[in-house]
Image (cartoon, rainbow, N blue to C red):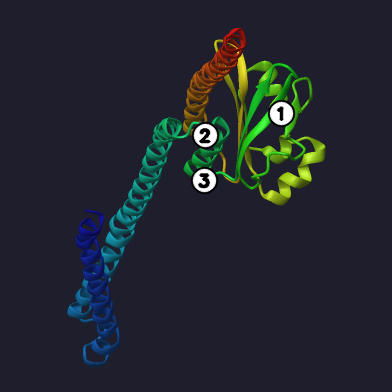
Amino acid sequence: MAVGASLPLRSMKWTLLLLLLIVAATELGIMLVLPAIVPADNAVLMAWADVGLLGVLSIGCIWLLVLRPLRRVKEATAENHRRSEDVLARQISLTAIPTEIVTAAANIPCMTQMLQICSEVILNRLDAVLTRIWLFDDATEELELKASAGLYTCCDDQYGRVALGSASKIAVIARTQRALLTNDLHGDAAPENKEWVQEAGLTSFAGYPIVLDEHLIGVLAICSREPLSPVVVNHMATVADLMASWITRRRAVEQLRESRANLEEAVTARTADLERVTAAEH
């Protein structure tokens, strides 16, 4: 539609430009040739000169007042259309995150592997630089890094375990159970992290508490080289809530599986003891 709609405007533009050149050439010929063969006070010469000048001015006015504004409107419309397509593509990409996470959760029994896949899905869908997931350990009151995708994939670095009472952004998010967002990460970073932020070219940070019924489960953090829009920020809060429900259910399943394994082991041991006692009595 955009290409087809531009053809009449382009044709009109070149037609008017051609007319402008023809009229200008005619006017120039009139001004140079006719004075040599027609007396200067001839009314015909003056009339032709006036007509030619009027034609040039008219076409020039049409170009300035009609075609140039139309061209600018067309360019602005194309830019708005491109931006609308980008926004739509981003929204589609965002809505696909929960589906991918749920699908992966159904096929992978190990929670650590699932969290790693979650971090990779978020990283790719947001075109981020770094995505990390910490889980809270009630016994030690520390946040343990379980998944990391992007710039760093190792989970045993200086942020592998974060004390709940520390001053780091991750600890603050966990304590307050409130999201922490910035599109000026270099300005908001701690002094010891400013050099690293600048070297990595990071611009934005979004951290979300993973909470279910006010019970702290963990923290999700995202770093990007591009500003994070409000649409992304709000949608990722929903993703964090989804992760909280999934992690809680998966923990319950793992605890049930562990309890069943312990019970089966105890039954097997008790059965063996009874068989030994029975054999000894006979």
In the depicted structure, whether residue 13 falls above or below residue 130:
below
Amino acid, disc 2: Met
Q: In this view, does 211 lie to the left or right of 88?
A: right
Work out how far the residue at label 2 is from the one at label 1, CA to CA, in angstroms.
Answer: 24 Å
Depth check, front residue: 175 or 225: 175
Residue at x 25% of width, y 67% of height = 54
User: Which of disc 1 and disc 2 is earlier in sequence?
Assistant: 2
Asked where in the image residue 184 lies, by quadrant, the reply is top right
Residue at numbered disc 2: 114
Mark 2 or mark 1: which is in front? 2
Residue count near mark 2 (Cα–Cα under 10 Å), binned few <14, some 14–19, many ≥20: many
- Local secondary structure at mark 2: helix
Q: Residue tagged by mark 1?
A: 169
Q: Residues within 10 Å of mark 3 (few under 14, many from 20)?
A: some
Q: Which residue in the structure is indicated by mark 3?
A: 127
Please tell me which residue lies in front, 201 or 52. Answer: 201
Q: What amino acid is at disc 3?
A: Asp
Type of amino acid at the residue the image marks with label 1: Lys
Q: Nearer the viewer, residue 93 or 83?
A: 93
Farthest residue to the right: give it: 192
> Toward the viewer: 269 or 27?
269
Q: Give the residue at x 34% y 51%.
A: 78
- Say which element carries label 1: helix
Residue lying furthest bottom: 37
